[in-house]
């Protein structure tokens, strides 16, 4: 939620995908400075989305979440891949077993996701869990 009188119209709703890390690049943009090389590399400037509910370009297409205990999740649009269930952090339950509590066995919500993208994201998560890097 944003309240910025004179800049962001009251009642504005945006479908932009943003992360907490994006506030670093956004604050730099607001004060008119650049971040030093290597600082906040994952941060995106969300200022265009704050000033315009339908910006020319998405802030980000994909979001990767990483929990305190090393659990990953990926989101792109309506698609989510959540291989581990639970809070992933300090709150309980830290992990959940769908067989014991019920609920869907599939941890992926794949509306509109092509099989190729499902395989690609699955491979990325498996590589990260195995300690392999893409670079």
Image: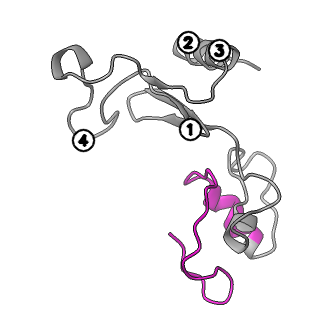
Magenta-tinted stretch: 1-29
**Residue 125 placement: quadrant:** top right
Label 3 secondary element:
helix
Q: Are marks 4 and 3 in contact (CB under 8 Å)?
A: no
Residue highlighted by disc 2: 126
Residue hosting label 4: 91
Q: Residues within 10 Å of mark 4 (few under 14, many from 20)?
A: few
Of the two numbered discs 2 and 3 in the rendering, the one whose residue sits closer to the viewer = 3
| Disc with the residue nearer the chain's start (4 vs 3) | 4
Decide: marks 2, 4 in contact (CB < 8 A)? no
List x then y, in percent, for residue 45. Answer: 73, 59
Is 51 inside the magenta-drawn segment? no
Q: Is residue 122 left or right of residue 68?
A: right
Task: Say which residue appears at 43% left-offset and 26% top-offset.
Answer: 71
Callout 2: helix, strand or loop?
Answer: helix
- Evaluate if marks 1 and 2 touch, with contact meaning CB atoms under 8 Å apart: no
Q: Is residue 128 above or below residue 46?
A: above
Q: Element type at marker 1?
A: loop
| Mark sitting on residue 78 | 1
Q: Marks 1/3: CA distance?
A: 15 Å
Instruction: Identify residue for label 3.
Output: 115
Comparing 31 with 14, the one in front is 14
Sequence-first disc among 2 and 3 = 3
Q: CA distance from mark 2 to mark 3?
A: 16 Å
1 or 3: tag closer to the N-terminus: 1
Nearest to the eye among marks 1 and 2: give it: 1
Instruction: Say whether disc 1 or disc 2 marks the residue closer to the N-terminus.
Output: 1
């Amino acid at each position: 939620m944003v309240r910025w009188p004179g800049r962001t119209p009251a009642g504005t709703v945006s479908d932009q995908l943003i992360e907490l890390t994006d506030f670093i690049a956004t604050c730099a943009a607001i004060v008119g400075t650049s971040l030093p090389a290597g600082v906040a590399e994952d941060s995106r400037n969300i200022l265009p989305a704050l000033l315009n509910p339908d910006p020319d370009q998405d802030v980000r297409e994909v979001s990767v979440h990483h929990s305190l205990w090393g659990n990953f999740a990926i989101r792109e649009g309506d698609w989510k891949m959540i291989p581990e269930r639970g809070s992933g952090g300090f709150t309980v339950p830290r992990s959940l077993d769908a067989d014991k509590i019920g609920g869907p066995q599939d941890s992926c919500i794949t509306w509109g996701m092509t099989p190729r993208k499902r395989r690609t994201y699955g491979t990325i998560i498996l590589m990260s869990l195995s300690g392999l890097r893409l670079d």
